Amino acid sequence: MIDNLIVKYKVFNTAFQQIASNHMPVAGGTHARGTVGAMLGESRAGKSAVCAFYAAMHPPTYDDEGEVFSVVHMTASLRMTPVEFAHEINRLTAARHMPTRGGIGAYVDNAILRLLRVRTELLIIDDAQYLFFDRTDKTATDMFKLVKRIADFNALSIVLVGEEKINDYVYSIDAFANRGYNWVPIKPLTAGRKDMEKFGKLLGSIDRRLPFANLSGLEDSYIAEHLYRFSGGMIGRVMNVIRPAAFEALNDGSSHVMLEHLRTAVSTRMRKGDTFSYFGIDRDAA
């Protein structure tokens, strides 16, 4: 319950809608084909959690024509090669033992074609910046060509998820921009009064979903302010504190998460040079 805790809020809903509109432009209609969209923002803003949630809403199925993987959510890695990209597609579509006869080129081609065989409607590529940056021009071009080939099938849509610098690459070429490229920024809640009210309500929603007999008071202004200061409003960083604090509370047999649990969790996760006294932490001890 703690590991898989999902709370829908302003940032979550914006990200979810971006994926959904690129998958099914008209509710109840047919899925998009050959288009490329993007959901871009800082790390730990909650993008990956939304992707995983959306993919879980469209699990693999099976019918008279065989397997169906309507939504495939893959994560790119630093310096991922075309072969590794193909491995991921095969793994995510239950084809781990795809033969490599015919050489590397044939293996990559067959992996891409498998998206058509399993009738994929949407390919989500998480951490997509790793496909285009921190590479040589040649390897970046190789990865771009791979994604473009998938778009050129005109059979499914693609959503790139990652840092905003992805736009720098996309707008430097025409291939994606000409395919109805659209993007939305995913930004954390600010420290403004209205957003802090939303942040407090978000913490309250998280609190009500934790598996404890009593509420932990996470939306209390003192706790909310400290969690915001630590996280910068990024839900991923918030959960980096709440999850271990909740685990410790469970181990203690506590009826709720206490300040001491939050204090312990944050003490091992503070950035070097951060001297703020989170939840009354002893800064010298931290």
Image (tube, rainbow, N blue to C red):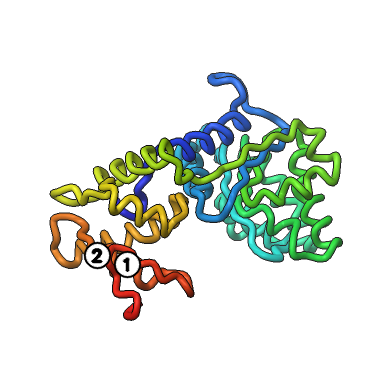
Relative to the observer, which residue lies in front, 275 or 132? 275
Q: Amino acid at mark 2?
A: His
- Whether residue 72 is visible, yes or no, is yes
Q: Residues within 10 Å of mark 1 (few under 14, many from 20)?
A: many
**Contact (Cβ within 8 Å) of mark 2 with mark 1:** yes
Q: Report x, y in % for residue 191.
A: 45, 46
Q: Report x, y in % for residue 125.
A: 63, 48
Residue 95 in which image quadrant:
bottom right
Residue, disc 1: 265
Residue at the image position 78 percent from the left and 49 percent from the top: 169
Q: Is residue 236 left or right of residue 211?
A: right
Q: Report x, y in % for residue 258.
A: 20, 60
Residue at the image position 24 percent from the left and 43 percent from the top: 208
Residue 158 in which image quadrant:
top right
Residue, disc 2: 261
Element type at mark 2: helix
Q: Is residue 154 above or below residue 224?
A: above
Q: Report x, y in % for residue 282.
A: 29, 74
